[in-house]
Image (cartoon, helix red, strand yellow):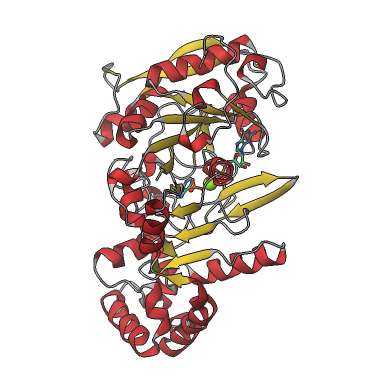
């Protein structure tokens, strides 16, 4: 203990990598628990940028236990490339451990992801085409191939044959692709097995040992609450559960092992891929937010759709995840706007009003945001390191957000760099903040 879960409170790309890297400094272990290399987590430190897809965002802290949990789906080519790249840049990766029970993304999963999207045509989800959905589908169908299978040629081959059999029809367009050749595929994956063998472990036990020894473990989520396959904007979602409850499943711990749940949210909102987005902007302001925020996918390079912060959705994310703390990133991106809008309710197609997240897909598709208009601020805030240094309007904005969802804001991002943050007074006493909170000034906390 303690266990601290970090989740995305929106549609992904909220800045989870940066927050995880910050919390990892004081933690003993960092565990990824779901998703795969559809994730792209960015860390900027000392002028260098790191883009991690499968590697837990604690890997830049030498010697810290970094776990890829059983709930993650692993493309071993991407993982070995990522390991090579980190080593090339001088990072010690020896403390990585990979769950023997995690499922593997196979070449046919990538093909099926492409084919599935092509077939949907205009209705496509806009997946990252990394094979995530088909891999989780095979896991649920009990046709998945796991990391431990990489260590036994006979088993690996048998499982590949069994997995390919029901997919023959869908894979017919790829029949001539050399990647589908049974022996070639087996050989390629055995090679990955040799390379990864030293990292493969019973990670559930390793995490238990950490918690039982009173060490602190950060569980790093990928994607975001609204991309959750059960609770997100289905079918425009990913194929895993990015919410806090999934940390238990994807790492092998119980709900009582979780002490804090930190939700990461941008000061505005983005979405990459298709699906409803009630506060979406278009025109000049949308482009301005995209350019100023560098809103292009870390994994695919796609331009992200942009919009105002959606407090209806954030309140929903708060409840679904039991958030105990909020980290608000990219506040600096809003500097210079005359007014900033916060969405506090939706209006449906026939004028109906919703102050909760509607469960019905059609309702959500037609919902548009209703806003509270707040004054903007002009000052550059990237140098601010305490709440008191922020312009009054920025503090008011944060207060509105925090009071609406009734969760304290503990961390504010004012730039991409790891030191471009403000630890608020509310972070005092949070295990995740590890004593980083500023000493109390006696002033009434504003956020
Ligand atoms: P993740 O997937 O949740 O880890 O987020 P991404 O890395 O995909 O996207 C977040 C982007 O915002 C990255 O480029 C970060 O470097 C950047 N970022 C994070 N926090 C801040 C912040 O407070 N201000 C600014 N300007 N950029 C930030
Ligand atoms: P991080 O961890 C933003 C989106 C895709 C698509 C949908 C399904 O960096 O926040 P998938 O390939 O998962 O089947 O695609 O989910 N998506 C993300 N959007 N950030 C992510 O990860 C995402 N991972 C998947 O764009 O809409
Ligand atoms: Mg990302």
User: In the rendered view, would you say 439 is above or below 363?
Assistant: above
User: In the rendered view, would you say 281 is above or below 135?
Assistant: above
Identity of the residue drawn at 56% across and 44% down: 26
* 54 sits left or right of 137 in the view: right
Q: State the image coordinates of residue 136 (x, y, percent, origin top left).
A: 33, 61
Q: Looking at the rendering, which quadrant does residue 166 occupy?
A: bottom left
Residue 222 in view in this figure: no
Residue 421 in view in this figure: yes
Viewer-proximal residue among 92 and 134: 92
Q: Residue furthest front?
A: 213
Q: In which quarter of the image is the N terminus?
A: top left
Identity of the residue drawn at 41% across and 53% down: 213
Identity of the residue drawn at 60% across and 24% down: 438
Viewer-proximal residue among 105 and 415: 415
Viewer-proximal residue among 444 and 277: 444
Viewer-proximal residue among 53 and 102: 102
User: In the rendered view, would you say 1 is above or below 337?
Assistant: below
Q: State the image coordinates of residue 284 (x, y, percent, origin top left).
A: 62, 25
Q: Residue furthest right?
A: 47
Q: State the image coordinates of residue 156 (x, y, percent, origin top left).
A: 37, 83
Q: State the image coordinates of residue 88 (x, y, percent, origin top left).
A: 71, 66
Number of labels in the image equals 0
Identity of the residue drawn at 45% across and 72% down: 200
């Amino acid at each position: 203990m303690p266990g601290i879960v970090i989740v995305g409170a929106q549609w992904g790309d909220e800045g989870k990598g940066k927050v995880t890297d910050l919390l990892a400094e004081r933690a003993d272990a960092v565990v990824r628990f779901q998703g795969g290399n559809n994730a792209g987590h960015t860390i900027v430190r000392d002028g260098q940028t790191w883009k991690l897809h499968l590697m837990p965002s604690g890997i830049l802290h030498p010697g810290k236990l970094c776990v890829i949990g059983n709930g993650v789906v692993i493309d071993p080519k991407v993982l070995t490339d990522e390991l090579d790249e980190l080593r090339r840049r001088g990072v010690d990766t020896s403390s990585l451990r990979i769950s023997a029970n995690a499922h593997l993304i196979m070449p046919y999963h990538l093909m099926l992801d492409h084919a599935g999207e092509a077939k949907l045509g205009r209705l496509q989800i806009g997946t990252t085409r990394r094979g995530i959905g088909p891999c989780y589908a095979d896991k649920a169908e009990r046709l998945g191939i796991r990391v431990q299978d990489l260590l036994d040629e006979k088993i690996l081959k048998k499982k590949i044959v069994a997995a390919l059999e029901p997919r023959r029809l869908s894979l017919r367009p790829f029949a001539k692709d050399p990647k589908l050749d049974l022996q070639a595929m087996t050989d390629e994956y055995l090679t990955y097995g040799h390379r990864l063998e030293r990292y493969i472990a019973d990670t559930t036990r390793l995490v238990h040992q950490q918690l039982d020894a009173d060490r602190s473990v950060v569980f790093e989520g990928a994607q975001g609450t609204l991309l959750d396959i059960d609770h997100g904007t289905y079918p425009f979602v990913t194929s895993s559960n990015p919410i806090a409850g999934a940390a238990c499943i994807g790492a092998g711990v119980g709900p009582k092992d979780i002490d804090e749940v930190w939700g990461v949210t941008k000061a505005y909102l983005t979405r990459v891929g298709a699906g409803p987005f009630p506060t979406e902007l278009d025109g000049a302001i949308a482009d301005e937010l995209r350019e100023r925020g560098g809103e292009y996918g870390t994994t695919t390079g796609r331009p992200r759709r942009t919009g105002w912060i959606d407090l209806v959705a954030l309140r929903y994310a708060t409840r679904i995840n039991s958030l105990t703390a909020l980290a608000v990133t990219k506040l600096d991106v809003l500097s210079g706007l005359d007014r900033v809008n916060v969405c506090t309710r939706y209006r449906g197609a026939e004028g109906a009003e919703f102050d909760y997240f509607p469960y019905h897909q059609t309702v959500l598709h037609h919902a548009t945001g209703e806003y509270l208009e707040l004054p903007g601020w002009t000052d550059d805030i990237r140098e601010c390191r305490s709440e008191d240094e922020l312009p009054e309007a920025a503090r008011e904005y944060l207060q509105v957000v925090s009071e609406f969802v009734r969760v304290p804001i503990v961390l504010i991002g004012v730039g991409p760099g790891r030191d471009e943050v403000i630890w608020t007074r509310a972070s005092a006493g949070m295990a995740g903040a590890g004593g980083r909170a500023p000493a109390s000034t006696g002033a009434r906390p504003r956020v």
